[in-house]
Image (spheres, grey):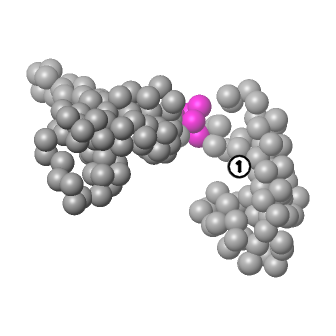
Amino acid sequence: MADKQLFKERLLGLQGNLYNFACQLTSDREAAQDLVQDTTLKVLDNESKYVDNVNFKGWVFTIMRNIFINNYRRQVRSATVIDTTEDLYHLNISQESGLTSPEGSYAAQEIGIAINAFSDEYKVPFKMYIAGYKYSEIAEKMGLPLGTVKSRIFFARKRLQNELKDYR
């Protein structure tokens, strides 16, 4: 009886840590609370499988991580679209990005024109950022402080949003 009580006390003592870890995994408070509850139930159901010389906290956290991974995989499987139509009709529908349509290419041209209207101090770092350069790489190539590059990209993005607010 004393061992079962000690087991439950140790588990209750970990609830705060479990919640923090669940928040890191889920990034959602309600989902984290559900994950803590599922973990607590699973740990209590598997109390007989716990061996005393095993790190209790590590064992409980591993159970939580496994529950999270299994739930994630279940969600991914349920979100998979299976086309049961004759001739796979839904899969054969073209999935356009919108850029090949006249409206999409016009929007892309407008965005390009708006970016090219920026002065070089904003245009160059913004185009480099769009091309995939990291802030630090842009700062190094342009010989500017990192904060300056970040602020120029921020202001270029804001200006672009204001100029193209009709496209939102």
Residue range of the region highlighted in magenta in the rendering: 100-105
Q: Residue at x 74, y 78 (%)?
A: 140
The residue under label 1 is 112
Q: Residue at x 64, y 66 (%)?
A: 134
Q: In the rendered structure, which amino acid carries the disc numbered 1? A: Gly
Q: Is residue 78 left or right of residue 142?
A: left
Where residue 28 appears, as percent x and y from the top left, is 50, 32
- SS class of the residue under badge 1? helix
Q: Is residue 86 left or right of residue 9?
A: left
38 or 166: nearer the viewer: 38
Whether residue 42 is visible here, answered yes or no, is: no
151 or 96: nearer the viewer: 151
Q: Is residue 162 above or below residue 153?
A: above
30 falls in the magenta region: no
Where residue 155 appears, as percent x and y from the top left, is 83, 49
Q: Pick out the residue farthest to the top.
A: 85
